[in-house]
Amino acid sequence: MSQVIREAEESDLPGIVGFEIDIARISFGDEAITDPAVHEKRVRSSLGKAGEITLVAGQPGTEPLGWAWLSRRTNSLTGARYGNFRSLAVAEHPERAETGERLLDEVIARCRADGIDELVGKVHADNLAMRALYRKFDFEAVHLTMRKRLAP
C-alpha cells in the first residue's frame, strides 16, 4: 500500500468536505446539511488545533482516500478524558477496508500516547460498514438513540 496516514492540511479540505457531506447524507438523509461552506468552516477550525486528531490517508498533494477526526473531551462530572469520534470515512477504492483500518489504528495509537483510554463514536444504524469496523476494533454498543417525529 503506497498511501500514508498523515496530518490533514488545508489543501485536503475539498476532499475532506466531500467526506463530511457523504457522512451527513448517510446519517441524516433528506435532512442532511450539504452546504460545503458549512462543513469547510467546521473542519478548517479543527486542523492543527490542540485536542483534535485530524488525519487523512493518501500521498501529500493528492485527493485524500480517507479521513478521520477525533476530538479529545473531558467528562464534566467525572473529569475523565476520552476521545469522541467525529468522522471516519473512506473513498471507494480497491483497498478501502484496509484504509479505514489504518486510519482507526493511527487514531487509537495517538489516543494511547496521549493517555486517553476510552473512545466513543456515534454511527447511524444503517451504516453497516462503520459498525463492522468499530466491532473489528472491539468497540461495543453502549447507547441507542430513539426518535419519534411529532406531526405539526
Image (tube, rainbow, N blue to C red):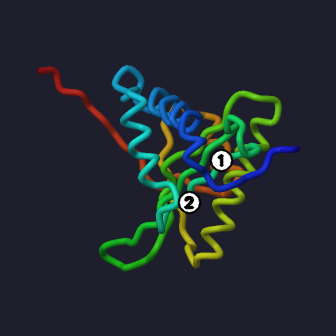
| Mark 1 neighbour class, 10 Å CA radius: few under 14, some 14 to 19, many 20 or more | many
Amino acid at dot 2: Ile
The quarter of the image holding the C terminus is: top left
Q: Is residue 27 above or below residue 11?
A: above
Q: Label 1's element?
A: strand
* Spatial CA span between label 2 and label 1: 10 Å
Depth check: give the residue in front, 145 or 64. 64
Q: Can you say whether 103 is above or below 148 in the image?
A: below
Q: Toward the viewer: 124 or 57?
A: 57
Q: Position of residue 142 (x, y in %)?
A: 48, 55
Specify the farthest residue to the left: 152
Label 2: which secondary element: strand
Q: Residue furthest right?
A: 1
Q: Quadrant of residue 98?
A: top right
Residue toward you, 28 or 99:
99
Residue 124 shown left or right of residue 97 in the figure: left
Is 152 on the left or on the right of 148, as rendered? left
Q: How many numbered circles does the render carry?
A: 2
Label 1: which residue? 56
Residue that appears at 71% across and 58% down: 105
Mark number for residue 18?
none
Taking the spot 47% from the left edge, 47% from the top edge, the residue there is: 122
State which quarter of the image contains the N terminus: top right
Residue 111, image x, y percentages: 60, 69
Q: Amino acid at mark 1?
A: Val
Q: Position of residue 13 (x, y in %)?
A: 54, 40
Residue highlighted by disc 2: 53
User: For residue 77, what is the image quadrant?
Assistant: bottom left
Number of residues whose C-alpha sits closer than 10 Å to that of mark 2, classed few (under 14), some (14–19) or many (20 or more): many
The answer to whether mark 2 and mark 1 are in CB contact below 8 A is no
Question: For the point 37% across and 20% down, which residue is it?
Answer: 30
